[in-house]
Image (cartoon, grey):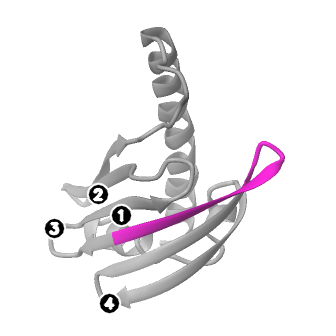
């Protein structure tokens, strides 16, 4: 689909977002302004609920948005998204800057393992979302 349509679809946050991602959870959406949204996510993971509060900033002209964790287990993490046109289609570029809190310093091997896991998890979610987007658009 076009980059404009993909951006609109990806940033049209709704209460059913977790089901689209293949996850269990609920989402509260607070629109602060046309380009600022607060998301309060309650995600069921590892047999318990995790609550995350996120600040989303939208830049529709650049087809860009950021998602900064304000509260939760990865507080201060930031995720950057850019939709780029590719002919009549589009491509998502994603940068994840995740902060993990630990009482001990992880080894290089542990960091690489976590990086691979997060990359695989995020890729799986975005593949599911792309499929749903294709069905809807």
Residue marked by disc 2: 89
> Residue 80: x percent and y percent?
30, 53
Prevailing secondary structure class for the magenta stretch in the rendered image: strand
Label 1 belongs to which residue? 1
Residue position for label 4: 33
Q: Nearer the viewer, mark 4 or mark 2?
A: 4
Q: Any mark on residue 62, and which?
A: 3
Compare residues 19 and 49 and report the one nearer the observer: 49
Q: Residues within 10 Å of mark 3 (few under 14, many from 20)?
A: few
Rendered position, 23 above or below 54 = above
Question: Please, what secondary structure does the residue beneath circle 4 have?
Answer: strand
Indicate the position of residue 11 as horizontal and vertical percent values: 40, 72
**Which region of the structure is painted magenta?**
44-56
Distance from the alpha carbon under mark 2 to that under mark 3:
16 Å
Give the alpha-carbon distance from disc 4 to disc 1, as whole Å.
Answer: 27 Å
Q: Secondary structure at mark 3?
A: loop
Apparent side of residue 79 relative to residue 40 in the rendered image (left or right)? left
* CA distance for labels 3 and 4: 18 Å
Q: Residue at x 56, y 49 (%)?
A: 73
Alpha carbon of mark 1 to alpha carbon of mark 2: how far? 5 Å
> Mark 2 Cα within 10 Å, few/some/many (few <14, many 20+)?
few
Say if 23 sits above or below 117 in the image. Answer: below
Looking at the picture, tell me which residue is in the foreground, 131 or 20: 20
């Amino acid at each position: 689909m076009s980059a404009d349509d993909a951006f609109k679809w990806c940033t049209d946050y709704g209460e059913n977002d977790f089901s689209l991602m293949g996850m269990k959870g609920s989402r509260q959406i607070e629109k602060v302004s046309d380009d600022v949204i607060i998301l309060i996510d309650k995600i069921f993971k590892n047999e318990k609920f995790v609550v995350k509060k996120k600040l989303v900033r939208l830049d529709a002209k650049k087809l860009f948005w950021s998602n900064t964790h304000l509260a939760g287990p990865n507080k201060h993490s930031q995720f950057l998204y850019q939709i780029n046109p590719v002919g009549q289609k589009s491509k998502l570029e994603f940068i994840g800057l995740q902060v993990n809190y630990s009482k001990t310093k992880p080894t290089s091997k542990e960091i690489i393992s976590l990086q691979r896991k997060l990359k695989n998890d995020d890729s799986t979610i975005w593949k599911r979302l792309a499929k749903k987007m294709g069905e809807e658009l």
